[in-house]
Amino acid sequence: MKIMKYSKTLLILSMIVPWVTVPLLGKNTLKRYIAASTFIALMVRLTNIGGGGMKKSIQEYLETFRLC
């Protein structure tokens, strides 16, 4: 499908373009935002780890409402 082909290209570009612009930020700006980006990455990782155990219980909960 053409739509999926363009979507993959857009996803790849959205991952590459921010890394290309990093050298344009400057040293002081990069130092200022590195702490915030590290904190956000840590929080996302902890959320993923904590949410992994809940996946099975959520699926069981949703199966109780299945109308089969």
Image (spheres, grey):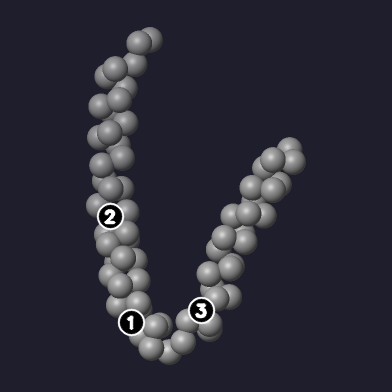
Q: Between residues 50 and 35, which one lies in front from this camera angle?
A: 35
- Residue 37 seen in render: yes
Residue 50: % across, % down: 25, 52
Disc 2 marks which amino acid?
A: Thr
> Which quarter shows the N terminus?
top right
> Which amino acid type corresponds to the residue marked 3 in the rendered image?
Val
Mark 3 touching mark 2, by CB under 8 A? no
Q: Mark 3 points at which residue?
A: 22
Crowding around mark 1 (Cα neighbors within 10 Å: few <14, some 14 to 19, many 20+) is few
Mark 1–mark 3 CB contact (< 8 Å)? no
> Marks 3 and 2: which is nearer the front?
3
Helix, strand or loop at disc 1?
A: helix
Residue 63 image-quadrant placement: top left
Mark 1 or mark 3, which has the lower sequence index?
3
The residue singled out by tag 1 in the image is 32
Cα separation between marks 1 and 3: 13 Å
Residue at coordinates 31% horizontally, 65% vertically from top-left? Answer: 40
**Number of numbered discs overlaid on the protein picture:** 3
SS class, disc 3: helix
Q: Where is residue 46 drawn, in percent x and y? A: 27, 59
Q: Nearer the viewer, mark 1 or mark 2?
A: 1
Toward the viewer: 6 or 48?
Answer: 6
Which residue lies most toward the top here?
68
Residue at 43% of width from left, 89% of height from top? Answer: 27
